[in-house]
Image (spheres, rainbow, N blue to C red):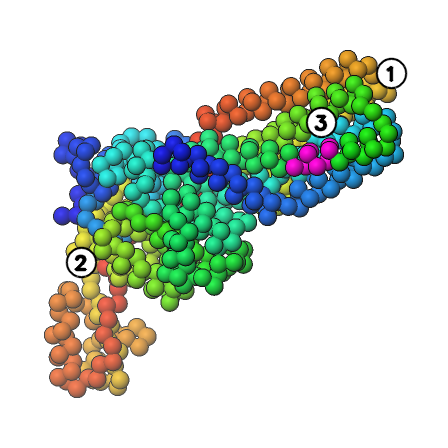
Amino acid sequence: MSESATENVSRSLLSVSVRRAWVTGRFFLVYGTGISLLLGVLLAHFSGPSFASSYPLFVPIFGVVGSMGGLTVFTSDRTKGVLEYLIAYGYSPRRLFANVLLTTLVLVSIVVGIGVSVSLGVYFAAGHTATSALTIGVGVYAVPMAFACAAFAATVGVYWTALSSPRAGINSPVGLIPFIGILPALVTLFVIVAITLSGPLSTTTLLLILGSATGLVAIFVIVLLASMGRLLRRERLLSPA
Amino acid sequence: MGFDTNVPDSSVSAGTDAGIDCRSVTAGYLGSRVLHQISFRITEPSIYVVLGPNGAGKTTLFRTLAGILQPYEGEVYIGGEPIDRQSSRDRLHYLTHMDGLPDGLSVREALEFFARAEGAQSRDVDRVLDQLEIRDLSARFPSQLSAGQRKRVSIARIFLRERSIYLLDEPTANLDPKVARETRELILKLSREKIVLYSSHNLFEAREIGRYVLVIKSGQISRFDRIENVRGSRYVLGIRVLQPSPALAAYDHEGEYYLRELSGPEEVPAVLRELMAQGVQIREAREMENPLEDLFT
């Protein structure tokens, strides 16, 4: 394949993967988007200014749940021999990993895009204004942490899928990864709650905690991604012989 | 001759136009060696049946030839070029032992997906839907297909675009006899101008379809020969008759068959003539044991 043909095929692979993720993982997408919307609208409408410090903390959790379709497709493709077929036709494992990651990021952008824009719309429509806490919460934490956590879940899921025997159900990567993927967001949430209970939380401290959490997860994902080529050899992606 | 085994490296240059040139290849999974120093060269379009017990290394051989597994030692050339080049990969089709059908896509969408990956067109998808008689399955998803239908769709993708080499790992597994026969006929047509490596556990199928047999045992090629040259250690003729006859008194029995061990198939006409001369009404005569069975022992 020429370079432009390869690019076209890669784009085509991504669009097909996103569509397949919708077909096979629409429960996750609908559930993640729906709960995010419901919680966002309720908080925006009823909680007043405390929306700014509460809603952003939940967004990454729903982002992870809603984007599980990408990993579902990858796990199924490995078990059913689709990855083997793609490797035989020249797709590198790196390109296949990138495809899972990009599919996941497309899905999380749908969850976050709809959830955050509608919730903020309701919040502003209720007469509230943008505060620095809200800007930090959404700009520094909610959106980037949603992408980072989803990427974290997808990357750990790819490792787990590739390094284990194929299995299905709740005891499989797809069954357990949502719980692992939301851990960074849950830890951050508990830290914020613990600090708030012991005293007032300044904007600077909030910025520091949220920025650090997002940064740490992002660095962890980058390290995992950088190690993929070395740790996940193509044999790991084949169906059982 | 269409093949060579244990080809010395010096006799083959990288620029050779050979179809498949496998030179002292050792390969396996994550450092564990499954194939050991395998060498052979195939140039003649034909069907080469790959036989071997479970775990012998058949699938590993296919994966290595397809460029999926990188050899620990040795080299694989396809059409004279190293397998890691895209131009080499573009010369071959590989059908895995799994169906390889993506979830979430209908049959037609799956074939469109494969067609794009291989640079084929939508009209090729229509052609294979008709060729494989699966147009009525177009809108169904893999989960709505029987095992045989899934295999048929899986096979359809190797007809999307013409290649010079086909690696088919158990293409008729899970197919009912009628569909298996039709599939073999398609592959036989294909093999007139192509090199087809075809793995199977079905020895009768291997004899029916193959011209050459390549036997793998414990990761090594134990035999590579024309199937007609493979003769069993014994040849047992089975005869079914319309009425029992005293002329068959000395024969052994197995079900409805009277058995007689011969030195080879060339003795069969004389034996049958002799029985008919004695008034035996023969309904059927067949070889009771497949000589390829001996290749497994």
Query: Which chain is disc 3 placed on?
Result: A
Q: Is residue A98 visible?
A: yes
Would you place residue A22 above or below residue A236 in this image?
Answer: below
**Dot 1 alpha-carbon crowd within 10 angstroms: few under 14, some 14 to 19, many 20 or more:** few
Task: Check the residue under mark 2 and report the chain it is in.
Answer: B
- Residue at horizontal 42 percent and vertical 45 percent from the top: B116
Q: Secondary structure at mark 1?
A: loop
List the single residue furthest toward the top.
A204
Q: Is residue A114 magenta?
A: yes
Cα distance between the residues tagged 2 and 3: 71 Å
Q: Nearer the viewer, mark 2 or mark 3?
A: 3
Residue drawn at (41%, 57%) of the image: B126
Q: Is residue A139 magenta?
A: no
Query: Crowding near pointer 3: few (<14 within 10 Å), some, many (20+)?
Result: many
- The answer as to whether the residues below labels 1 and 2 share one chain is no
Where's residue B82, x and y in %? 27, 33
Q: Please state the horizontal and vertical placement of residue A200, each as a whole percent of the image.
A: 86, 16
Q: Chain of mark 1?
A: A
Task: Report the magenta residues as a range.
Answer: A110-117
- The residue at which mark 2 appears reads as B228
Query: Which numbered circle lies on residue A142?
Result: 3
Q: Amino acid at mark 2?
A: Glu
Is B231 placed left or right of B157 in the picture? left
Mark 3 to mark 1: distance in Å?
23 Å
- Mark 1 or 2, closer to the camera: 1
| CA separation in Å, label 1 and label 2 | 89 Å
The residue indicated by pointer 1 is A199
The type of residue carrying mark 1 is: Gly
What mark, if any, has residue B54 been given in the picture? Answer: none
- A220 left or right of B60 in image: right
Residue B87 screen position, x and y as percent: 30, 36
**Callout 2 touching callout 3 (CB < 8 Å):** no
